[in-house]
Amino acid sequence: MNIQHNISLKPYNTFGIDVKAIDFISVSNLAELQTVLKHQNSDLFLLGGGSNMLLTKDITNKLVIHLNLKGKEIIKQNEDFVWIKANAGENWHEFILWCLDQDFGGLENMSLIPGNIGTAPIQNIGAYGKELKDNFIECEAVEITSGKVHTFSKENCQFGYRNSIFKNELKDKYIITSVTFKLTKQNHQLNTSYGAIESELDKQKVTNPSIKDISNAVITIRQSKLPDPKELGNSGSFFKNPVISQEDFKKFISKFPEAPSYRMSDSEVKIPAGWLIEQTGFKGKRFGDAGVHKNQALVLVNYNNATGEEIWDLAMKIKTTVLKKFNIEINPEVNIY
């Protein structure tokens, strides 16, 4: 085992926060991971693409494991569908582009979401009317205490809105090593009704869109709103969109009739957190090197040398202000350490 010491994690997190890992190891296959788990005698800190986290301090009391498991394969297919297994270290967006090159459909609406395959089920990532669970078949995960590989079906994962069993009962108990997806080979089910996809397709003069056209539209929309982490440190959407009861929604909409909303069920309504934040005046504001992006109020950014604590302080200031103005609580989508 090649454990390194005092490694800067700045290149390993999309916020670009410069904290150190006292003990660090990168694993590139399942056997290496199981060997590390067998010999580890400290708590673990799992690091994938580093896109869904805010690091606020050095990691001094945990072994940081960088999950760099690469590879993808078609495990079966028929005339209509294909089942693809992708390993945890594969980049999410690059995997989608590969699928599109094969004309495999289902993930195109989630183009350009940052991060790796292995963390996608934990969050049940989603965008523009699609969620990971829509094409998810199963994932394989290693039990940390035993090193044994277990398979989790969609039902086992208990997916919810930006949620799964891996954020709740099984948090810190398993490491996802691969995910299997079921995608379409023909008769693709296009989803263009959410957000600005249709208007973007109109702008591009696309009248009969393919799955690649939808991906390109989503990429264009996201790039117009979201900064590239390689140029400006960020973790995408920092806050989850709050879901409130119909009873609370009636009170809310009577005071703010112009507010956008999305009906989730007969009993719940989702309110865009970005709209709430924008109404409190934080959009585009900068506090030292921590700030809120000028084009998307949901995105907190590191302009250069902000610490994780400074970004977290800004997030809490936003949360408190939104609660005071709207009586709605917004909570982080990213993991805080």
Image (cartoon, rainbow, N blue to C red):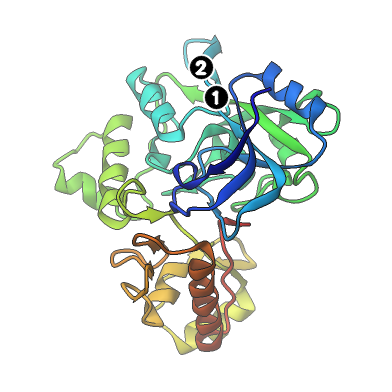
Quarter that holds the C terminus: bottom right
- Please provide percent x and percent y for residue 296: 34, 64
Residue placed under numbered mark 2 in the picture: 82
* Residue 213, horizontal then vertical, whole percent: 26, 34
Q: Is residue 229 left or right of residue 235?
A: left
Quadrant where the N terminus sits is top right
Classify 10 Å Cα crowding around label 1: few (below 14), some (14-19), many (20 and above): many
Q: Earlier in the sequence, mark 2 or mark 1?
A: 2
Q: Residue at x 38, y 77 (%)?
A: 282
At a point 61% along the width and 71% down the height, the residue shown is 244
Q: Which residue in the rendered view is the most extreme toward the right?
A: 146
Residue at the spot x=74%, y=26% of the render?
36
Q: Residue furthest front?
A: 6
Quarter of the image where one finds residue 201: top left
Left or right, 281 with respect to 174, comes to left
Q: Secondary structure at mark 1?
A: strand
x then y, percent, for residue 45: 68, 43
Residue 203: horizontal and vertical position, in percent? 15, 48
| Horizontal arrangement in the rendering, residue 275 relative to residue 215 (left or right) | right
260 and 237: which is toward the camera: 237
Residue 240 in the image: above or below residue 89: below
| Above or below, comparing residue 17 to residue 300 in the picture | above
Gap in angstroms between the C-alphas marked 2 and 1: 6 Å
Q: Which residue is mark 1?
A: 182
Question: Identity of the amino acid at label 1?
Answer: Lys
**Residue type at the position of mark 2:** Val
Do tag 2 and tag 1 residues touch (Cβ < 8 Å)?
yes
Q: Number of marks in the image? A: 2
Label 2 Cα neighbours within 10 Å, binned few <14 / some 14-19 / many ≥20 = some
